Amino acid sequence: MKVLVTRPLPNEAIEMLKKKFDVTLNAEDRPLTRQELLDGLKGKDGVLCLLTDKMNAEAIGANPQLKIIANYAVGYDNIDVKAATANGIPVSNTPGVLTDATAELAWSLLFSAARRIPESDRFTRDGKFKGWGPMMLLGRGITGKTLGIIGAGRIGAAFALKSKGFNMNVVYYEAAGKNEVLEKELGAKKVDLPELLKNSDFVSIHVPLTPETKHLIGEKELKMMKPTAVLVNTARGPIVDEKALAKALKEKWIFAAGLDVYENEPKIEEELLKLENAVLVPHIGSATVETRTRMATLAAENIIAALENKIPPTCVNPDFAKLKKSK
Ligand code: NAP
Ligand code: GLV
Ligand code: GLV
């Protein structure tokens, strides 16, 4: 069986795959070009791909021999899951193993934006620190404030639970049911999106990117937020209208934003790059040594299961087999 791995990953996972399969590894630490990806998929039984690899209907349709598409990410908006299912191909992701790492990054961005840490660091290095100042670099307090969670799934809930030490009033917005754990542990309340935006001092986004969540936060929503509020996005860039956000930060409709993800990665809206109240990091939500290793081995476990004719442990389209049989 032949497996394509589209970029160097923690070695444990590569070794797991090499023991069982003929592995083609893109040894260069850069994304494959479109053509390299399409060529590389030819004749492969499995692919371990990244969120930067667009596994659309074209790539999938040209490779119906694939028996597994294992994404090295929990979000799988880069994969046309419908096309995979129609071709009887299971798709897997890496849920759970990156939950705390991503929630920790969201807190890092919240603190950084609220307390103006990157701006203060630039200020200090630029030699502007001439002594303690009563009005110097004032930020926003966190303890006792209202925290709004958009999408109380694995990461959103873990992020909310970490607020315990800060005695916050937690509200959340969810598509479907209630989050009983958050309600019980934090006294959190489920609210609609306008209510969350109007009342929260901190808003953190944790929904997946879907047609419903694209531009969930645009000009209208940003205008509902408090002028003292901080917005954090570690989910997916297109959930926020980036141009509108730049305008909101520039014109101080909100206090600050902390962003890990962008609408057209790796491009970033020019205006954002100029703003002191935008804290910008390069999609590093899951970037810890422990988490990246576990993501790699989980993706490898999914490939091994699928190529040994078992259901992949973290399959997002468990109906793939049914459809294949009825084909
Ligand atoms: P999850 O457990 O599936 O949580 C997503 C939550 O969003 C669920 O509670 C879901 O509700 C809710 N939701 C879905 N569609 C919604 C909508 N239209 N309106 C309101 N709520 C909606 O996923 P997760 O593991 O927490 O990951 C969340 C996302 O974070 C991923 O999809 C990924 O894009 C992103 N992420 C980014 C990084 C990074 O490096 N920055 C790292 C990891 C993950 P239901 O369950 O009821 O559908
Ligand atoms: C990273 O962005 C992921 O979805 O895992
Ligand atoms: C500040 O450094 C203080 O002592 O209040």
Image: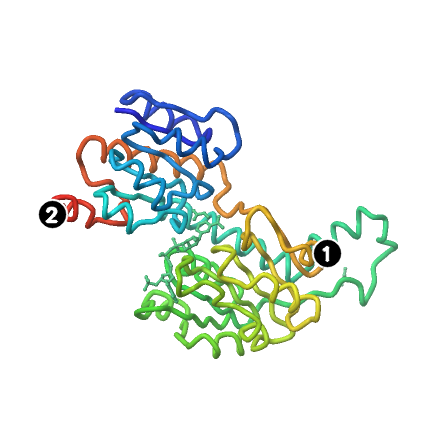
Quarter of the image with the C terminus in it:
top left
Residue that carries the numbered disc 2 in the rendered image: 326
Q: Nearer the viewer, residue 294 or 92?
A: 92
Residue in view at x 25 percent, y 24 percent: 1
Residue extending furthest right? 130
Q: Quadrant of ligand 1?
A: bottom left
Question: Residue 315 location, x and y as percent?
Answer: 26, 45
**How far across and how far down the image is residue 51, in percent?**
44, 44
Image position of 65 (left or right of 206): left
Left or right: residue 232 versus residue 26 is right
Distance (Cα) linking label 1 and label 2: 55 Å
Q: Identify the secondary structure beneath mark 1.
A: loop
Depth-wise, is mark 1 or mark 2 nearer the camera?
2
Position of residue 145 measured from the top left corner of the image (x, y, whole percent): 56, 72
Label 1 sits on residue:
274
Q: Where is residue 63, by image quadrant?
A: top left
Q: Residue at x 81, y 66 (%)?
A: 134
Residue 307 vertical position relative to residue 278 in the rendered view, above or below: above
Q: Quadrant of residue 176?
A: bottom left
Counting from the top left corner in percent of width and height, residue 107 is at 54, 56
